[in-house]
Image: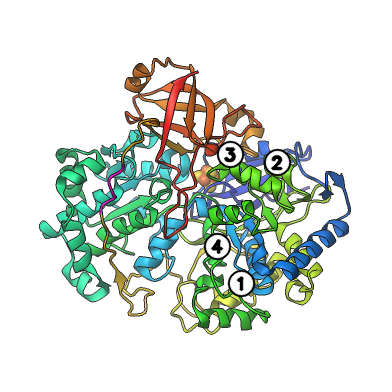
Amino acid sequence: MTAPQPTKTTCPYCGVGCGILADVSLDGKVGIRGDTTHPANFGRLCSKGSALGETVDLDDRLLYPEVDGQRVSWDAALRLVGSRFSETIAEYGPDSVAFYVSGQLLTEDYYVANKLMKGFIGSANIDTNSRLCMASSVAGHKRAFGSDTVPGCYEDLEIADLIVLVGSNLAWCHPVLYQRIVAAKDKRPEMKIVLIDPRRTMTSDIVDLHLPIKPDGDVALFSALLSHLFETDAIDQDFIAAHTSGFTDALRAADAMDILAIIEQTGLDHRLLRSFFELFARTDRTVTVFSQGVNQSARGTDKVNAIINCHLATGRVGKPGASPFSVTGQPNAMGGREVGGMSNTLAAHMDIENAEDRDRVRRFWQAPLVAAKSGLKAVDMFRALADGRIKALWIMATNPVVSMPDAGKIEDAIRNCPFVVVSDVIAKTDTVRHARVRLPAAAWGEKSGTVTNSERRISRQRSFLPLPGEARPDWWIVCEVAKHMGFGAAFDYKSTSEIFAEHAALSGFENNGTRDFDIGQFANISETEFDRLEPFQWPRHVGKEPSIRLFTDGTFFTRDGKARFTSLDLEPRRTTPAAYPMTLNTGRVRDHWHTMTRTAKSQRLSQHYGEPFAEIHPSDAASYNIGDADIIRISTGNGAILVRALISARQRPGSIFVPMHWTDQYASKARVDTLVPAVVDAISGQPASKNISVRIERF
Ligand code: SF4
């Protein structure tokens, strides 16, 4: 008897999007290996990916639909959801309902949820936890390139001569990309790596230069770099003249920044600034990788554009080993973007504020209408929930009671909403327990579809486990609710391949090749072809070679085809409130994921850090009379948490770092997002989770 073939699938954690081979043995154990043929990881996996087999058991699973805590049939649950949403819309209008979804959804799930809300309900009140992750990158790319388009690819990280990592602890948050860089540096030790981060994270172990920047000093730093590039004649005049607009204004704004203010805002001395600037100026093959330290800021979009300005000024966009490169947090943050997964975007990267785009999508969907304006972004959506404007909310595959800023108020808002539906894998998350209707969703390993990683590579997630209990895939649940709302004809899919084919067809519909996102060649994909689909990067136009990089010819997606510089001001001077003199920075640890619903199942992963902690510099620990492993109380006007002190010189004096993962389920009073105020970037709506004024004391 021949052994069954392993299933080729994709890791459900971070935006690297590693290929996985999953084997199920006769005793039901799941073996996990890296897929040596997958272009994201070539067989490598990190600790989280390797431990996936330990997290697929059915403990804590939500297996049956429930209403008011009682098991009900799917039909009863779906009828209730459909009728309550329909009645609410009839009484209060389409904007009285909302969906809050997740980068954990597959692209096909995202597609049908957006189609239902934007095309058939007629509101754009659908937002996603990706708002907390990469919304500033989306906005920055659109502002510079005319579209939300990441120009580079992973290979660029291996052939660059300089990698600048900004606000990114790649070693822990995108470990396989980090491993690829380590391997490249081993081969070419002359490759230089710079880390710009307030903390000396584990990523710093391989860097040649670390700039321990003050939180939110990035606009000042990259504006000063722009001035330096001009002064030292390191700009690409021909590229600027032929392919960009706005350089003179951006340079004038950068030049207007006083050097003392730059030093004050960055916290970096002349020597460090000069070393970095000279290295950047003389290295053509430079990739600037940026992540949450850039995006999760009240000026996240400006930070993205400050970085892109320097790449445009040197013509280093979309060239081998030379690009700005946003790396995203979730496995499918890019796939959600492709199908208009946020409240201010439309499917196939079309623009919800553009009447022609709306009309094109409406005709393609044969929808009654398409929402005529952007909907509420995550923070505003939960504010609307709190003040009663949203009267029915459906949360899919995410745990906002832990992960949203102002998490305590989010919990109150959800608890007080008249009708909350949660579709999830886990039965008792901090959010699920407040839901009136609980719908059991299929987990990783049980569902099938596509995800897109940080280099625009679309890969298949394939099922290799049976659906347990009455769990169903998210796309099926959305389509069944749509049918109960009277939209059955538009949601009559039999499988994810049909949804993928429709999504591909929309990307090519009336598209003369000017839109960035196009996978139109898959519009007629069969079930068998979808099943065999190998990883590929978009765009993938009919009759054209796939593009591994974008903008290689200097043509962008703006109306005039030119990339736009952004003129940026210095951050207004921030005064630290005397009552809250320390700065709190939140983030991830190596072995946990989001709110730990999956990774906490693995003993191996829980050994790395067994409890929440606050990393604090020895000088601050001394001033607050805090010893290693003491319990400390961290408070803001919003509340307080209790965590153990971890004294480390890796931390910047004046700042503390607390991981975001622990919830009240795993450690009492450890929900760090209860401390984070709901301050957002004015353009992207992304919350600022890295620079929060707090008070600390020994407990
Ligand atoms: Fe999964 Fe990311 Fe680790 Fe790859 S690097 S195995 S995608 S968590």
Q: CA distance from mark 1 to mark 3?
A: 32 Å
Residue 549 seen anywhere in this rendered image of the structure: no
* Tags 2 and 4 touching, CB below 8 Å: no
Residue of label 4: 342
Residue 498 seen anywhere in this rendered image of the structure: yes
Label located before the other in sequence (2 or 4): 2
Q: CA distance from mark 2 to mark 4?
A: 29 Å
Res. 56 mark:
2
User: Dot 3, how many residues are within 10 Å of its Cα: few (below 14), some (14-19), or many (20+)?
Assistant: some
Q: Secondary structure at mark 1?
A: helix
236 w.r.t. 155: above or below: below
Q: Amino acid at mark 1?
A: His
Label located before the other in sequence (1 or 4): 4
Res. 50 mark:
3
Left or right: 585 as drawn, with respect to 674: left
Label located before the other in sequence (1 or 3): 3
Q: Residue at x 58, y 59 (%)?
A: 127
Label located before the other in sequence (2 or 3): 3
User: Dot 4, how many residues are within 10 Å of its Cα: few (below 14), some (14-19), or many (20+)?
Assistant: many
Q: Residue at x 38, y 31 (%)?
A: 582
Residue of label 1: 503
Q: CA distance from mark 2 to mark 3?
A: 12 Å
| Magenta segment includes 35 | no
Q: Secondary structure at mark 4?
A: loop
How far across and down, in percent of the image, does residue 602 sit? 64, 32
Q: Amino acid at mark 4?
A: Met
* Tags 4 and 3 touching, CB below 8 Å: no
Magenta residue span? 570-574
Label located before the other in sequence (1 or 2): 2
How far across and down, in percent of the image, does residue 227 sit? 16, 56
